[in-house]
Image (spheres, grey):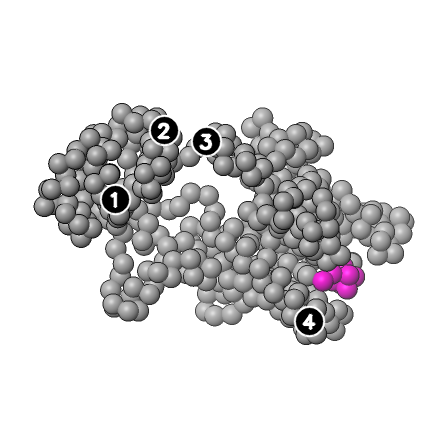
Amino acid sequence: MTDRAVPLEGVKVLELAEGVAGPFAGKMMGAMGADVIKVEPPGRGDAARAFPPFLDDAPHPETSGLFLYLNTNKRGVTLDLAHPSGRELARRLVGWADVIVESSAPGRLAEWGLGYEAIAPLNPGAILVSVTPFGQDGPYRDYQSSDLVALALGGLLYITGDPDREPLKLGGQPSEYFAGLAAFSAAMVALHHRDAGGEGQHVDVSVLEGIATAQMYAGLNYAYLHENRRRQNAFAPMFRAKDGHVGVMYRQPNWPTFCEMIGHPELVRDERFRDVAARRDHAGELNAIVAEWMASQPKEELYHRAQAARMPFGYICDARDLIESPQYGARGYFQEIDHPLAGRHLYPGMPIHWGHERWELHGAPLLGAHNAEVYGGLGVSGEELAVLRACGAI
């Protein structure tokens, strides 16, 4: 890679985060050239190591697909922050870091003497990025959460799904990845501020507020009209195609072309569907007509036909569709990454391009793989490491 593709070269990141959001932020920084040291509890490691999929469907802490994806381009060490000797080592790591990403419960780091008030005197330029479900304050700050809780309390579930059914959860963990992107962005802004003559600071990232921001259109609907936005999937329905599903938008600027394509040109003159408002009011009748035609159409072929006519269709991709997509292929999105235990496999890449280069992604670390390298760099001798290992501090 050229220097253009290493924008964070020289930046040092200490990752004290587990799960998805914090590690995703660290992954982004690592891919951009930062030296990211991931700290994991001795023995069990990051909680993500226990999540499937696993290589050959055999649970193993070193072959979790989730962990391997989230922790590329990092060095890994073990450290027990609850142990006095572990906290002393952590303070030395804090003195080394430019950015510290953590996901402990609010107040936990302060209990260990590692809160921002303790970090700032050790390293005035350090940026502490805290990623928690509800943020560092407020009546919910100590509550437990999950992606489902964030989607529910963030308001996104209320507007997701069919209007005559219960709210529908989005697949995966979108609130966590959204928060990870927010943490990454906030760290970049804080670094710019510091390097422009400012100082380090504590960045507070709330997973809940990220989702509330993502669905703010519905919030504005209430603020402006004093009414809740309803689920309206009937007006942007998903239809079963010959080999999958296709999503259709009825706000077609070229309604006659749409009617011609589905074999019903007479619908142009049908008063039930004369304009967008009428089509919304008679969506059920229109859906029945479209569904009958759609059932015989190959999903990808239909997608290209509709897009060629400037109609916003989208076929629903499964995993194979994603990997075989010519769009992802042309942009080099999926990359093969090697790992000493999991082997060589295809992984999703980065959602950002820098110039014309691809990011260089390297395999996630084995648990504690860089203990000697990292702690030795802090001046810890081999004998001291042996003692720290024996007492459970690392």
Residue labelled with disc 4: 196
Circle number at residue 301: 2
Which label's residue is closer to the chain start, 1 or 2? 1
80 or 270, which lies in front? 270
Helix, strand or loop at label 3? It is helix
Q: Position of residue 76 (x, y in %)?
A: 72, 46
Do tag 4 and tag 1 residues touch (Cβ < 8 Å)? no
Q: Is residue 265 left or right of residue 327?
A: left
Alpha carbon separation for disc pair 3 and 2: 13 Å
Helix, strand or loop at label 1? It is loop
Whether residue 388 is visible here, answered yes or no, is no
Residue labelled with disc 3: 321
Which label's residue is closer to the chain start, 3 or 4? 4
User: In the picture, which quadrant includes the N terminus?
Assistant: top right
Identify the magenta region: 91-98
Residue labelled with disc 1: 254
Farthest residue toward the left? 271
- Image vertical order of residue 153 relative to residue 353, above or below: below
